[in-house]
Image: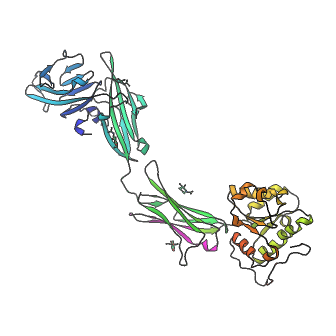
Amino acid sequence: MHLGQLPLTLLVLMLRGTSETCISRPHINAVEGEPFFLKYCPLSPVHEPSTTKWFKTSESDEKVELRSSSSPRITLHDYVLEFWPVELDDSGSYVFQRGNDTHGWKLNVITRSKHSCFTEKQVTSKTVEVGKALQVDCSHSYYQDLVHRTALYKNCEKIENNKNPSLKKNAEFKDQGYYTCMFFLHHNGKLFNVTSTYNITIVEDRSTIIPAILGPKINHVEVELGTDVQLNCSAWLNEKDYVYWSFHRKDGQDPNEHEGEEIKIRTSEGKWQASRILRIENINEKNLNFSYNCTVSSDKGPDTKHFILVTKDGKTYDAFVSYLKGCGPAHGAERAFAVEVLPRVLEEHFGYKLCIFERDVAPGGAVVDEIHSLIEQSRRLIIVLSTSYMLNEVRYELESGLHEALVERKIKIILIEFTPVSDFTFLPQSLQLLKSHRVLKWKADKSLPYNSRFWKSLLYLMPAKPVQPRSGECEAEPVLAHGSSP
Ligand SMILES: *[C@@H]1O[C@H](CO)[C@@H](O)[C@H](O)[C@H]1NC(C)=O
Ligand SMILES: *[C@@H]1O[C@H](CO)[C@@H](O)[C@H](O)[C@H]1NC(C)=O
Ligand SMILES: *[C@@H]1O[C@H](CO)[C@@H](O)[C@H](O)[C@H]1NC(C)=O
Ligand SMILES: *[C@@H]1O[C@H](CO)[C@@H](O)[C@H](O)[C@H]1NC(C)=O
């Protein structure tokens, strides 16, 4: 909108306290139906009294002198011509004359909008940077004494209604919109209203910031071997800046390290924030005490933070072994596998520590609670699966472990199919979420040697261990206990 066409009321809206109500601009817009005035201000102080005259020139170039009696809507006093209210046919040229002093205006009366609380042609556009002060102060420099009530609207919805409504806040993007002050005033027993509308656009903060990664310079993250961790790097930055992780080593990157996508958001205050995850799965020794560096790159210079994984005093057991404890001859082999073969290989040969309820827990006590806490103290839950497994009370172990695994994401489950299970449908549905490679098939004698595919796969799923196979144990195979059939 052309500034020269702004009505006075709009100009003073945010300049409260100004007493300057003279209108010297030659082109003036007014809205049909609203009170309106033209005021002349003498350039130099007036000393001798002199008569003042107002003229209107209509389209036919006819110059008519205006008097208060010309129209019930017109009031003349001193240097002011008032319209109560101004109407479409008041458009035209107006001239004020006092002695040799004259001043002219061209008035354009705009049709009132029927569907809106303001008239689109009569708005003042204003741009505010997000985060900076946004102020709308409804006071009227000319009519203020006559105003008995003022309402402030945003997009034609009333947001405040009293004598001097105002809005003062730090601009947010959602503040964008049309703000209309509507002044209600009485004149000669009639109620009128005058509007002033601002078209406020909220723009981005044009200043650039020095980017900064959140949190301390060096972060020690406590982890357990064999578990997963997500390092979350977040930074305040500028729109063009970006965040990345450095985790490559001379010998290439560890395959268990995965950098996520950068996620960038703009807060309602207009600030940019980015975050990027580095996910390390099945943490091994190589991942410990290594500096994972997160950097925000920017024209304003980089900022880097370091993340170092350290072990905490971790879980008591590497794995909790769940198996069918039935004593019947049909289940003897499963039991022997769980309480003899697994410990002999995983504990004695590969140095893991297992929790086997029958072996490690004294009889008696609150079994259910105890199982739950033992599973919690274990990094893996190994389930020795057979068709009869689910029919037994061990089901509790399965469900407790499943809960930890799937809901709390604390433990990983390893399924060992000890005897061929033809029908997996008896398993809880949640087990179907497990990756199929976590189901290992035990193939009796074929699986027995330490270097069999079975143990290799199992070790892969077990928490990473720095410990090498024990020397001095040179037997090629763990033997099943006497009395149990393979
Ligand atoms: C303001 O005045 C106009 C013209 O008299 C009228 O049509 C309109 O309804 C009034 N608005 C309000 C909110 O009273
Ligand atoms: C209000 O401002 C916006 C953004 O600057 C502009 O696109 C729109 O045309 C303006 N509306 C009016 C009625 O001037
Ligand atoms: C990373 O941290 C930021 C900032 O605290 C947060 O907004 C974001 O959601 C986090 N990301 C994840 C995946 O937790
Ligand atoms: C991380 O930063 C440290 C200190 O600048 C440096 O010694 C280390 O090599 C960096 N690590 C990577 C993976 O770039």
Answer with left or right where residue 205 lies relative to residue 90.
Answer: right
Answer with left or right where residue 87 lies relative to residue 52.
Answer: right
Residue drawn 43% across and 60% down?
211
Q: Which quadrant would residue 126 be assigned to in this image?
A: top left
Picture layout, residue 368 above or below residue 42: below
Residue drawn 39% across and 34% down?
166
Picture layout, residue 283 above or below residue 235: below
- Could you say which is closer to the camera, residue 14 or residue 478? 478
Residue 106: image x %, image y %?
18, 30
Residue 247 magenta-drawn?
no
Picture layout, residue 263 above or below residue 439: above
Residue 299: image x %, image y %?
38, 64
Q: Which residue is situated farthest in the left direction here? A: 100
- Could you say which is closer to the camera, residue 231 or residue 306? 231
What colouring method underlies this structural image?
A: rainbow
The answer to whether one can see residue 172 in this image is no
Residue 209: image x %, image y %?
40, 57
Residue 296 magenta-drawn?
yes
Residue drawn 36% across and 41% down?
200
Quarter of the figure that contains the N terminus: top left
Counting the numbered discs, the total is: 0
The answer to whether one can see residue 209 in this image is yes
Magenta stretch? 281-307
Q: Which quadrant would residue 471 be assigned to in this image?
A: bottom right
